[in-house]
Amino acid sequence: MKVEVKAPKYVFQIIAVIVTIILIWCISEISLIMIKTHDYVKTDATIDKIIYEDYKPINDNDSTVTIYYQVSYTSYADCTSKQYTADIVKGMFVNKTENDKLTVYYNPDNPEELRPDVSHGIFGVIIFGFMLIGMIVFITKGEFK
């Protein structure tokens, strides 16, 4: 299947380069988080409370809602078991209710510090990956004038 395009081919090549840069940026953000938190300890946390924070950035018509899970978890660092409570941002692909279990990763040197969620970065990699594949197919299969 050939697609006839009235724009020059270099326009789509520039768009593909921009999408590639954004894709590399998303992958590097995820990689940096994973490298920085490679020694974090995995544990189960219980969701104690769901917190909805409404933020209105521009005017009364536009608003965003950030959802936090207030979780409690036990740290076993230094052979002691101590209970901690923290607020974490709800991940994109997580839909939990109160008293549900959630896996968290904490810093063994500072058990109050949790690894941030990377689901937004993963979503970006998926979207921009498909966009890049589409652009490559479009550039190779399209007929440009």
Image: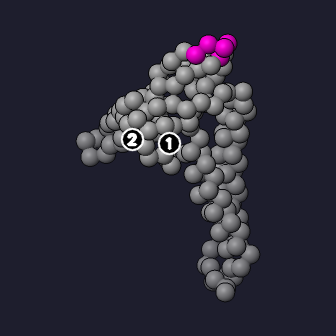
Look at mark 1 in the image and give the residue it sits on.
91
Could you tell me the amino acid type at mark 2?
Thr
Could you tell me the amino acid type at mark 1?
Gly
Q: Up-down: is 145 above or below 70?
A: below
Horizontal side, residue 21 vs residue 117: left or right:
right
Which residues make up the magenta segment?
A: 77-81
Q: Quadrant of the N terminus?
A: bottom right
In percent of width and height, residue 34 lies at 69, 35
Q: Up-down: is 43 above or below 139?
A: above
Pair 1/2: label in front: 2
Q: Residue at x 46, y 31 (%)?
A: 46
Q: Residue at x 66, y 14 (%)?
A: 79
Q: Residue at x 59, y 58 (%)?
A: 127
Residue 87 sits in quarter: top left
Q: CA distance from mark 1 to mark 2?
A: 13 Å
Of the image marks 1 and 2, the number of the one nearer the N terminus: 1
Residue 128 shows up from this direction? yes
